[in-house]
Image (tube, grey):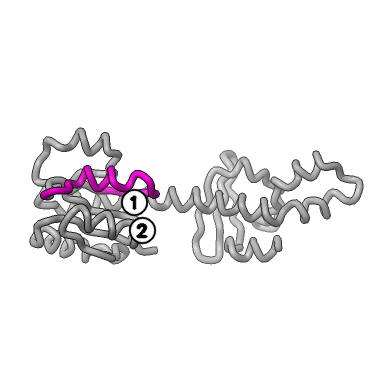
Amino acid sequence: MSIRTILVDDEPLAIQGLELRLQAHEDVEIVEKCMNGREAIRAIKTQKPDLVFLDIQMPGFDGFSVVQGLMEVEPPLFVFVTAYSDHALRAIEARALDYLMKPVEESRLADTLDLVRQRLAEKRSVDEVDRLKEVLAEHAPEAAAADIGDAGTDMQANRFEKLINIKDRGQIFRVDVDTIERIDAAGDYMCIYTGDNTLILRETMKDLEKRLD
């Protein structure tokens, strides 16, 4: 999966240099390049990127102002890029993922992108869990009622609607959705982690939704 990326710097040569270094990373897709902070805010709201490389010192609207101007939307991951080391503490306070010094070293950039991939994988896993819970909330009450029969009470239905059958290596596991910590999706499989167990489900989220429909 590609990392949708925006580059922001008032110096064209700085953008070109960073773009050149990013070419070595095939999963990085540069969707827009901005020359000032106001352009950056508009681009981020429109493009909804995963990652923004953001210069700090820009005339009129600096990098910190860009972050502040996006408080009302779900922000991307920010990596500050600057020629000055004295902004590091403020970058941490702004919850930047990382802080790179110009000129950007390729090895340092590679480390940053590894961290980006890790954070995005964690976020997507959380999103998968939330999506699973939404699917079950929408479809599972009817399935649960069928499981417990006509004699089932509302209390029983509420308990069963949070359970899902997962077939892993020939065994059927009845899993409480609330115990699911994360889900890693890979092709036609989902790895479901429940704290003390890891189950492999040969099914996509879309297939699961169809099965429950």
Q: How many other residues sit within 10 Å of disc 2, few (<14), some (14-19) or many (≥20)? A: some
Q: Residue at x 14, y 60 (%)?
A: 15
Distance between the alpha carbons at the discs numbered 1 and 2: 7 Å
Does the magenta segment cover residue 60? yes
Residue in the foreground of this view, choosing between 131 and 203: 131
The amino acid on which the numbered mark 2 sits, given as a three-letter code, is: Lys
Place of residue 201 in the rendered image (x, y in percent of width and height, measured from the top left): 61, 58
Instruction: Decide if residue 132 is on the left or right side of residue 115.
Output: right
Is 148 drawn above or below residue 2 in the view shown?
above
Quarter of image, res 158: top right
Magenta residues, dominant SS class: loop
Does the magenta segment cover residue 2? no
Q: Image quadrant for the N terminus?
A: bottom left
Q: Residue at x 50, y 54 (%)?
A: 184
Q: Secondary structure at mark 1?
A: loop
Q: Residue at x 28, y 43 (%)?
A: 68
Place of residue 182 in the rendered image (x, y in percent of width and height, measured from the top left): 52, 47
Quarter of image, res 180: top right
Q: Image quadrant for the C terminus?
A: bottom right
Is 19 drawn above or below residue 137 in the view shown?
below
Instruction: Decide if residue 70 is on the left or right side of residue 65.
Output: right
Place of residue 53 in the rendered image (x, y in percent of width and height, measured from the top left): 23, 53
Q: What residue does disc 2 label?
A: 48
Q: Secondary structure at mark 2?
A: loop
- Where does the magenta region start and end? 59-78
Quarter of image, res 139: bottom right
Q: What residue does disc 1 label?
A: 76
Place of residue 188 in the rendered image (x, y in percent of width and height, measured from the top left): 55, 66
The amino acid on which the numbered mark 1 sits, given as a three-letter code, is: Pro
Instruction: Decide if residue 122 is on the left or right side of residue 16.
Output: right
Residue in the foreground of this view, choosing between 90 and 59: 59
Which is nearer the N-term, disc 1 or disc 2? 2
